[in-house]
Image (tube, rainbow, N blue to C red):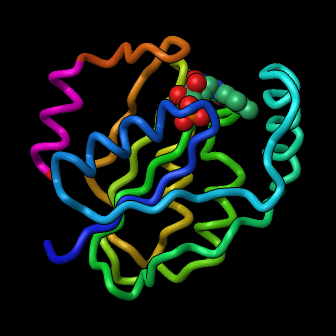
Amino acid sequence: MGKKLIVYYSYTNNTKKIAEKIQMATGADICEIETVKPYTGDYNSVVEQGKQEVDRGFKPAIKPLNVNLGDYDTIIIGTPVWWYTYAPSVATFLSKYDLSGKTIIPFATNGGWIGHTLKDIQNSCKDAIVTNAIDIRFDMDKMVTPEANLNGWINCL
Ligand SMILES: Cc1cc2nc3c(=O)[nH]c(=O)nc-3n(C[C@H](O)[C@H](O)[C@H](O)COP(=O)(O)O)c2cc1C
């Protein structure tokens, strides 16, 4: 499938843990999306700020990626679910970078309400092949999706 890159955003590290597990298993390159302005305050205030950002379609500035996307055929994109869709920082990534012609494999960590996240990624990557998406459920920082399901998915990457 050519060269693979894992690109992810993570606020409370669930998505980061999965991204690192994929990296260990596949040897793919890995790159974190970071906002220029960090989210601050307690968890509930970030949940509220996230709602306002998702509702407005806000795209926060993100730091430049330290990779050249042109080097990769397959991009594994990881996002937490924020208000039934991908995180605003991932919205910035998807709008800023040209993913046309690439194979996109999404994974979305969430607390049980994935909403339209995977469909939204599909719609935002119109000129790419979006395939093999996975919904990974957590209860706070504990993974609820069976480990075997995740491992089975990783083995197919
Ligand atoms: C702003 C915000 C909005 C969230 N909205 C949802 C949601 O709509 N559905 C859901 O199942 N979980 C939601 N969650 C929970 C996260 O998706 C879940 O904890 C995820 O695994 C966090 O990933 P992270 O640790 O990589 O940031 C939300 C969390 C935050 C901070």
Segment tinted magenta in the rendering: 147-156
The answer to whether residue 64 is seen in the rendering is: yes
In which quadrant of the rendered view does residue 35 lie?
bottom right
Is residue 71 left or right of 95 when viewed as pictured? left
- Residue in the picture at 39% in, 33% down: 135
Count of residue discs: 0
The answer to whether residue 115 is seen in the rendering is: no
From the top left corner, tell me how far across and down residue 90 is, in percent: 61, 57
Name the magenta segment's main secondary structure. Answer: helix
- Residue in the picture at 79% in, 27% down: 47
Q: Quadrant of ligand 1?
A: top right
From the top left corner, tell me how far across and down residue 143 is, in percent: 38, 17
Q: Is residue 149 magenta?
A: yes
Q: Quadrant of the N terminus?
A: bottom left
From the top left corner, tell me how far across and down residue 80 is, in percent: 56, 38
- Residue in the picture at 16% in, 46% down: 25
